[in-house]
């Protein structure tokens, strides 16, 4: 599970603290562990960066402590723009990796915490297409979102995956938030119509981890089969070559015998 936190310059220190308090409340209700829920944090502005990866902490207390100590700002991005599309892309390709502790058999949850709309025109289409991958589930928690951005967020994620409130303290009081997020049950709801993402930042194959695994197995099997065929051909060539060489040498010897003086 990746918590993706708005770190633009419109987020004051008190607002950032409110987000951290909300996260601590969520994590406190989770079963954190190497064989349970694994949590990491990404912050974003016009780009994104990892605060801590999935593999770093294996207990809820450690995650909560690290969350409380989060600081605003990162040299990896500017805080002037809120580019959620870039943050989601970064999370998909740079955060959810095997090296960072991602598990191929687990659903990847993207939990966005934001104070406003996103910059860019392709966000809705990109996120909708991304969710065609059933190993991905995206949630957006917004605070004081205007009507235009509200419609974009609602259109981007599956039903019930977007929640808005007047503060993150209000989100804390929403019991459905804890039921949905902290249990991590079930696969992501697949949108009725899955379109191809038009973002030039990244493309998504819209396949599950299981499908990828099956494809890899088929590729490995094909490679093994071709390797066996090549080895058989090489052995056949060697055997035939040896036979031809022996035959030629035998004829040469006969010719020499015939030509030798008596």
Image: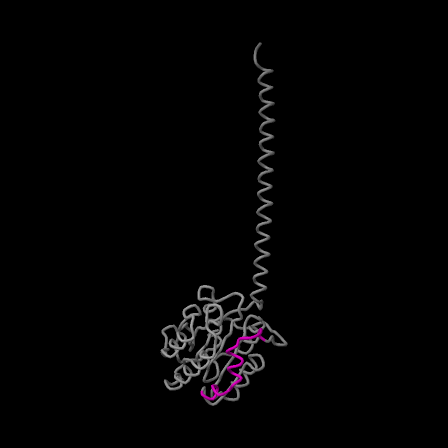
| Magenta highlight: main SS | helix
Q: Quadrant of residue 204?
A: bottom right
Is 90 situated left or right of 195 in this image? Answer: left
Residue 153 lies, in percent from the top left, at: 53, 82
Residue found at the far bottom of this picture: 166
Is 101 situated left or right of 191 in this image? Answer: left
Residue 176 lies, in percent from the top left, at: 53, 84
Q: Quadrant of residue 10?
A: bottom left
Which segment did they paint magenta?
Answer: 169-188
Residue appearing at x 58%, y 20% in the figure: 253
260 above or below 83?
above
114 above or below 94?
below
Residue appearing at x 46%, y 84% in the figure: 116
In the image, 18 versus 132, the foreground residue is: 18
In the image, 81 versus 63, the foreground residue is: 63
Residue 53 lies, in percent from the top left, at: 42, 70
63 above or below 223?
below
Residue appearing at x 57%, y 40% in the figure: 234
Name the colour scheme. Answer: one colour
Residue found at the far right of this picture: 192
Q: Quadrant of residue 211?
A: bottom right
Residue 39 lies, in percent from the top left, at: 45, 73
Say if residue 28 shows up in the picture: yes
Q: Is residue 122 magenta?
A: no
């Amino acid at each position: 599970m990746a918590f993706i936190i708005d770190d633009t310059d419109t987020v004051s220190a008190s607002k950032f603290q409110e987000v951290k308090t909300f996260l601590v409340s969520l994590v406190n209700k989770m079963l954190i562990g190497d064989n349970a829920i694994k949590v990491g944090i990404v912050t974003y502005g016009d780009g994104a960066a990892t605060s801590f990866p999935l593999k770093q902490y294996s207990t809820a207390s450690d995650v909560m402590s690290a969350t409380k100590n989060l600081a605003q700002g990162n040299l990896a991005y500017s805080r002037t723009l809120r580019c959620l599309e870039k943050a989601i892309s970064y999370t998909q390709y740079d955060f959810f990796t095997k090296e960072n502790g991602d598990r191929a058999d687990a659903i990847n949850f993207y939990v966005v915490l934001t104070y406003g709309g996103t910059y860019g025109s392709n966000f809705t289409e990109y996120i909708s297409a991304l969710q065609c991958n059933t190993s991905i589930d995206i949630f957006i928690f917004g605070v004081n979102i205007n009507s235009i951005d509200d419609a974009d967020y609602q259109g981007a994620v599956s039903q019930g995956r977007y929640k808005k409130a007047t503060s993150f303290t209000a989100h804390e009081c929403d019991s459905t938030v804890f039921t949905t997020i902290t249990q991590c049950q079930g696969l992501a709801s697949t949108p009725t119509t899955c379109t191809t993402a038009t973002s030039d930042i990244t493309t998504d194959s819209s396949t599950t981890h299981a499908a990828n695994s099956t494809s890899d197995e088929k590729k490995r099997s094909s490679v093994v089969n071709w390797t066996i065929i090549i080895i058989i051909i090489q052995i056949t060539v060697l055997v035939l070559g040896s036979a031809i060489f022996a035959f030629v040498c035998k004829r040469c010897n006969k010719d020499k015998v015939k030509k030798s003086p008596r």
